[in-house]
Every structure is written in C-alpha cells, then in structure tokens.
Amino acid sequence: MELILKQDVENLGFKDDIVTVKNGYGRNFLIPQGQAILATISAKKVLAENLKQRAFKEKKIVDDANKIAEALKALEIKIAAKVGTGDKLFGSVNNINVAEALEKEGHTIDKKFITVTTVKRTGKYNAVVRLHREVTVDLPFEVIAQAK
C-alpha cells in the first residue's frame, strides 16, 4: 500500500514522503491517526505541486537549522545528577534531561528530536539532535556529580 505521510513518522519517513507499508499498518494505524493519506494519482500531483512551491521556503528553513546547529556545537552542557558509590547515578540521564539543559542555555528543542543512549554513570557522552530532516548535530555533554 502506497501512502503519503502528512507528518514525520518514527522509523518510517518524513512529512510528504511517499512510502510503501503493509496494508494493515496503513489502513488500521497511519490513516486513522491522521499521519498519512492514500497515494492516489491525484494526491501525487497535488504533492508534486506543493513540493515545487515549498522548495525555496525549505532552503531558508535548512539555513536556519544550520545556524542553530552551529550554536549548539559551541555549547558545553553539564548535567548534574545524584551519584551513589563510585560514579554510578541514582536513576539515569536521558533525552528529557538533555532537552532541559538546552532550555537553560536558551535553545528550545523538543525531546523527541533528541536521541541519547540511557546514561547510568558520570562522564562524557554524545546526544544526536535532529533539527531538520537534512540537519543533525552531535551534541557532546557531560554528566557530573550533583553538589550535596
């Protein structure tokens, strides 16, 4: 079944992509959730026209995302967490903590666009921030012991 995505779908594609999925996934999940429409001939023509009109706007969006990426690369993020014996954390540090740290630095980025492996020890780690479908940033951050 061919579908046109109306919004970004994790592990499937980005908005306005034409994707092929199994019939049940499309009919029972994507279409009822409003995440996709059937890729009929007329829908493909409308999509092509919309993409043509959006091409020059897209360039500006990508340029803005690149500026944000440069600003993020310059940041040094330190996340304080409670530490037990040695360097083990009570709990863990994840994408929500990284989003909060970025918020404190003045950059509002939704937590769903930040990918972090769950961190359970102090040290230096990397997060991947997706600002646009074409722009991703490796964001280094450090987990430090919280002052008592």
Image (spheres, rainbow, N blue to C red):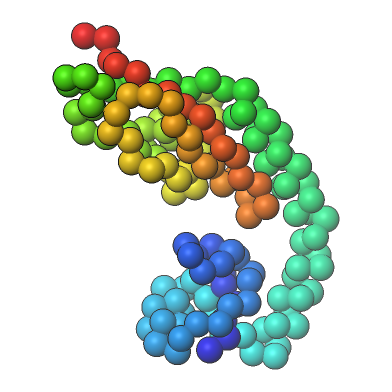
Q: Position of residue 133 (x, y in %)?
A: 63, 54
Report the residue at 53% width, 20% height from top. Answer: 76
Report the residue at 38% width, 24% height from top. Answer: 123
Q: Position of residue 23 (x, y in %)?
A: 45, 89
The foreground one among 15 and 122 is 122
The foreground one among 143 and 6 is 143
Report the residue at 60% width, 29% height from top. Answer: 72
Q: Position of residue 146 (x, y in %)?
A: 28, 15
- In the rendered view, would you say 15 is above or below 89? below
Q: Residue furthest left?
A: 85
Q: Residue furthest front?
A: 86
Q: Taking 25 as reference, is 145 left or right?
A: left
Q: Position of residue 55 (x, y in %)?
A: 80, 60
Report the residue at 59% width, 64% height from top. Answer: 14
Q: Taking 36 as reference, is 80 left or right?
A: left
The answer, for residue 32, to whether it is visible in the render is: no
Q: Taking 47 as reference, is 52 left or right?
A: right
The foreground one among 135 and 88 is 88
Residue 54 in which image quadrant: bottom right
